[in-house]
């Protein structure tokens, strides 16, 4: 029997990496707390839960943000810096996952799943067209790309339900419902597969669609998948 996807840790206590110390705690709606004294972090503006008054908030300029706004998505990215701790949570049940990036490493993330990242991590994006337009609106959907361009860093993601990780060997594949994948390594190839359901009265004329991931590398799976509305 092949190895099953592994449930990722849902709690983290006093983890040090990439210039920050952080904690993840809580069950239904987890909270991420980060000490930003030595390293600023940027985050989506609506996820702030609480902060020390000495932590300052400002807008952060991201490469590619203007192009994404032109594509129909308003994104406001804010940055926290200064002495103290800031805490985040998303308004939905789920699982907060830290992705540690060594200098030069990159991770691809499904749109709408980004929570926060250290300032050492750069951001770009790519648009996936084709069959994705059948699922996410005519514009297709976006993949966010985070790169440890300026040193070691962390990207924190929010997955709905619980998050599992599957490590694929070279050439090994896994099929995932298009709303069920959360992140993948750059080395993992993603393609869309369509099976026509033509047998039986109720199956006639329907398609069964999955994303196929081929290793080597990691792919993240969220158990409570969501299809976001079209951005256009």
Image: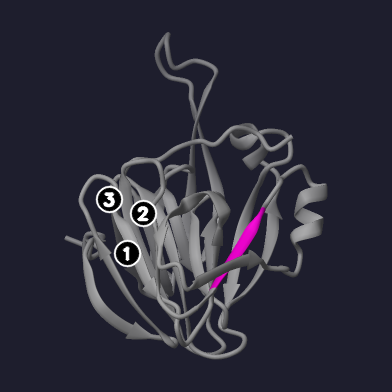
Residue 173 appears in the rendering: no
Question: Which mark is drawn over residue 166?
Answer: 1
Residue for point 73% across, 68% down? 61
Secondary structure of residue under mark 2: strand
Q: Quadrant of residue 64?
A: bottom right
**What residue does disc 3 label?**
162
- Residue 54: percent from left, percent from top: 47, 73
Relative to 108, 175 lies left or right = left
Q: Nearer the viewer, mark 1 or mark 3?
A: 3
Residue 232 in percent (x, y) is at 74, 34
Taking 52 as reference, is 209 above or below it?
A: above
Residue 182: quarter of image? bottom left
In the image, which residues are magenta? 76-80
Rendered position, 19 above or below 135? below
Crowding near the residue tagged with mark 3, few <14, some 14–19, many ≥20 C-alpha atoms within 10 Å? many
Badge 2 local density, few (<14 within 10 Å), some, or many (20+)? many
Residue at x 59% of width, y 34% of height: 135
Does dot 1 land on a helix, a strand or a loop?
strand
**Which of 219 and 172 lies nearest the eye of the viewer?**
219
Separation of disc 2 and disc 1 at Cα? 8 Å
Residues under labels 1 and 3: Cα distance? 13 Å
Say if mark 2 contacts mark 1, CB within 8 Å.
Answer: yes
Instruction: Identify residue for label 2.
Output: 221
**77 in magenta:** yes
Q: Is label 2 in contact with label 3 (beta carbons under 8 Å)?
A: no
Vertical placement of 85 versus 158: above or below? below
Q: Counting residues from the N terminus, which is met first, the one under dot 2 or under dot 1?
A: 1
Look at discs 2 and 3 and give the one toward the viewer.
3
Residue 120 shown in magenta: no
């Amino acid at each position: 029997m092949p190895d099953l996807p592994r449930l990722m840790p849902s709690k983290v206590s006093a983890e040090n990496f990439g210039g920050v110390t952080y904690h993840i705690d809580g069950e239904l709606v987890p909270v991420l707390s980060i000490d930003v004294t030595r390293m600023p972090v940027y985050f989506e503006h609506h996820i702030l839960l609480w902060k020390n008054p000495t932590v300052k908030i400002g807008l952060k300029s991201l490469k590619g943000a203007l192009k994404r706004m032109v594509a129909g998505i308003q994104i406001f990215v804010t940055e926290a810096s200064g002495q103290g701790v800031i805490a985040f949570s998303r308004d939905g049940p789920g699982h907060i996952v830290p992705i540690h990036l060594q200098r030069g490493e990159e991770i691809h993330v499904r749109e709408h799943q980004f929570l926060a990242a250290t300032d050492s991590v750069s951001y770009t994006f790519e648009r996936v067209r084709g069959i994705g337009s059948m699922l996410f609106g005519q514009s297709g959907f976006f993949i966010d790309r985070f790169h440890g361009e300026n040193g070691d860093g962390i990207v924190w993601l929010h997955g709905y339900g619980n998050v599992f990780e599957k490590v694929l060997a070279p050439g090994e594949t896994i099929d995932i419902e298009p709303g069920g994948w959360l992140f993948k390594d750059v080395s993992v190839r993603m393609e869309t597969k369509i099976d026509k359901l033509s047998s039986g009265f109720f199956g006639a004329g329907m398609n069964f669609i999955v994303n196929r991931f081929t290793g080597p590398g990691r792919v993240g799976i969220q158990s409570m998948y969501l299809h976001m509305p079209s951005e256009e």
